[in-house]
Amino acid sequence: MELKMNTLTKEFQTLRAVNGISYTMHNGVYGLLGVNGAGKTTLMRMLCTLMKPDSGSITWNGVDIFKLDGEYRKLLGYLPQEFGFYPEFSVYDYLMYIASIKGLRPTTAKKRIETLLSQVGMSKARNKKMKKLSGGMKRRVGIAQAMLNDPKILILDEPTAGLDPNERIRFRNLISELSEDRMVLLSTHIVSDIEYIANEILLMKDGSLTLSGTAEEIIASIPEKIWNCTVFKSEISNYMKQYKISNIKTVADGAQLRVISLESPCEHAVLESATLEDAFLYYFGEKAEVNEYDAEI
Amino acid sequence: MMLKYEIKKVFSRTGGKISLFLLVFLLLLTCYFATSISYVNEKGESENGYRAVQKLRQAKKEWAGLLDDEKLRAVLTENARINAMPEGQAENNVTLSNITYGRKQGFSDISSLISHAFADGFREYDYYKADSLCAEQAGNFYPNRIRLLRDWLYDEAKDQFSETEKTWIIAQYEALETPYIYDYSDGWQQLFEFSPTIIMITMLVLGYLVSGIFSNEFSLKADSVFYSSVYGRNKAVSAKVKAGICITTTLYFIMILLYTVIVLLYLGADSMNHPIQISWKNWKTFYNLTFGQEYLLIVMGGYIGCLFISLLTMFISAKTKSSILAVIVPFILVFLPSFVSFFQSSVVNKILGLLPDRLLQISTAINYFDLYSIGQTVVPAIPILFLLYGILSIALMPVIYLEYKQKQLG
Ligand SMILES: Nc1ncnc2c1ncn2[C@@H]1O[C@H](COP(=O)(O)OP(=O)(O)O)[C@@H](O)[C@H]1O
Ligand SMILES: [Mg+2]
């Protein structure tokens, strides 16, 4: 069980959306972290055989996935970033149709759909039309369809985007529940989505993998230190220019900055332990998108 | 399973349901027009409805039987007798001439044939010809058909056909068994007259229905899940092709069946085994067929035409990922030829004669003198159309499949 990418490259006109990526995946949850436009979706769409790489290859247990064709897709579950469906179909009909193109027999499909509907908490909405579902419900049906064939390889492209905080947490739990005994690749631009559920985190920037490892390894790889600095409001912009600031919190007589720097950036600076958010900022040079509610939990 | 859901995708759309209602509505409307026959009674008034149909049928049936010299003489004699009546003498009185018309209804079909047979030229038609003939001339009825044709072929139309083709057409005329057997045939005639309407309506609606089968996966953004599934690049694609064929076949035959049953139940199916040349509309056709045989040609031609246009629509849908472009195809194929036909030229006509819209209107195509010579063999248009579009339809099926199967997603 080994999915291997060898110097994978995909170009759109002059843009290299994926630029020479080599990486090997086994069972476990892989979090693909990168800002919008990093090339996550492009990479995943190649892994799903939706488009062919311009150069490089993808192999499953040593065989090219485009040669394996149906054999490979049999093992695949995919939730695309833009999840499209047949709006007039009921949830049940939609899943029955997808089950049929995934090669499930009707009787097997029915049982499988029952299980999945209750697992994603959609049993009651089974007869609702797809177009009548809320964003979160659609996403849950999306997960269910990806899981229909009990895939060995589950690819989820930004499954939590656009969900409210509560739903996002439920989703995280659902994904970690479903991830047993398979290879899950989950993309996001939100650190908290994968911080705790991913065994392995891949940082992707401008089409390349910058860094990969466990959350601890990635945090430990920051060659600088994290400082907590209390400054006057008027000084904030100066600090912003000079340092990478991973967080700003307004306090009574100024602001508390979370500064990434080798040296202490101000007097009375307090040394703090680094988080994955800090790593994200350090490597991507921009602040990770943090959900207000998420930060509290 | 896949097939069932592909069909469901088409009809679950609001547009899919609306088009079914539209089909039913247009079917009833066409049937209404096809069955609108009037009968003129003794008072010169027009009657409509089922009773009128029965009266007209009765009147015509009195002249049923072998259309030989004797029958033709009887028609000419009866025509002269009616003309001699007081009402027949009144020239400018509408009511009186209607009464006269009413009296001639029973043999109106036959006198129309006489108008053709005794016209001054092949392309002429003299409505009042029967009035000026005497009974003794009846014997020229069948020979005239061939004589007029021959005169036309070697004079006005001499450059239009090759020598072999001229011989072939004349041979077809001579091969037709005479005398004809005449009977009431308005049921078939009306059925044929409106068959292009019903078939074209069905075609346009079918085109709309199948136009989205392939492109909608893309416009709905359902393509990613589709193509990443096991059958996404094989069985699920053939299920789509099958769905299109299924929808086309089923809807087409349901429409034709309903149309046929309604019209023939109302107007009667008499003359099924009689030559179509007993209808003045088909007097000149070189296709020697019975009404029953022409009906089969119309139905099968319409089917092959619809199937071909449906498949072409599906191909464009698969190729361009756009249902708008796809849905234009049937409109172009159905309507464009009638515009192009304004440019009268023999090359244009040769091409027009082989376009698929002809298959949708066999009842008209049957009267065209479209001939194609392959070496010394002369072949009329209709068998070529059947063969050509039959083969193209079958060839399109794997082409659509392969086109859609290998799509790369952007
Ligand atoms: N079909 C396409 N045509 C042209 N450019 C594309 C296409 N798809 C993606 N891109 C470009 O490739 C880059 C990577 O996009 P994407 O893979 O969607 O990134 P991500 O999923 O990480 O946000 C972006 O700059 C995007 O604009
Ligand atoms: Mg993306």
Image (spheres, coloured by chain):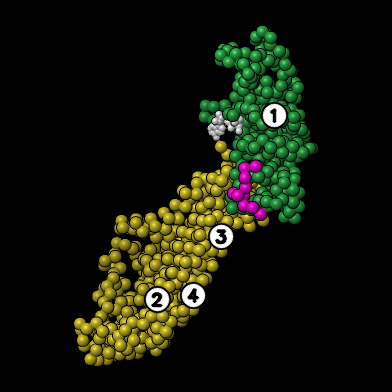
Residue A296 — which label?
1
The image quadrant that residue A238 belongs to is: top right
Q: What span is in magenta? A: A127-136
Question: Mark 4 to mark 3: distance in Å?
Answer: 22 Å
Q: Which residue is mark 4?
A: B262
Pointer 2 and pointer 3 on the same chain: yes
**Placement of B61 over or under B161, stated as above or below:** below
Marks 3 and 2: in contact by CB < 8 Å?
Answer: no
Cα–Cα span, label 4 and label 1: 74 Å
The chain whose colour is yellow is: B
**Does dot 4 land on a helix, a strand or a loop?**
helix
Mark 2 crowd level (few <14, some 14–19, many ≥20, 10 Å Cα): some
Towards the viewer: A29 or B42:
A29
Report x, y in % for residue A38: 60, 27
Query: Which chain is indicated by disc 2?
Result: B
Q: Check if residue B31 falls in the magenta segment.
A: no
Residue B247's mark? Answer: 3
Q: Position of residue A275 (x, y in %)?
A: 71, 21
Q: Tell me which chain the residue with mark 1 is part of.
A: A
Three-letter amino acid code at disc 2? Answer: Ser
Q: In which quadrant of the rendered view does residue B60 lie? A: bottom left
- Element under disc 1: helix
Chain to which mark 4 belongs: B
x, y percentage for residue A157? 65, 36
Q: Between tags 2 and 3, which lies in front? A: 2
**Residue at image x 44%, y 76%?**
B188
First in residue order: circle 2 vs circle 3: 2
Residue annotated with mark 2: B36
Looking at the image, in which quadrant does ligand 1 appear?
top right
Amino acid of disc 1: Glu
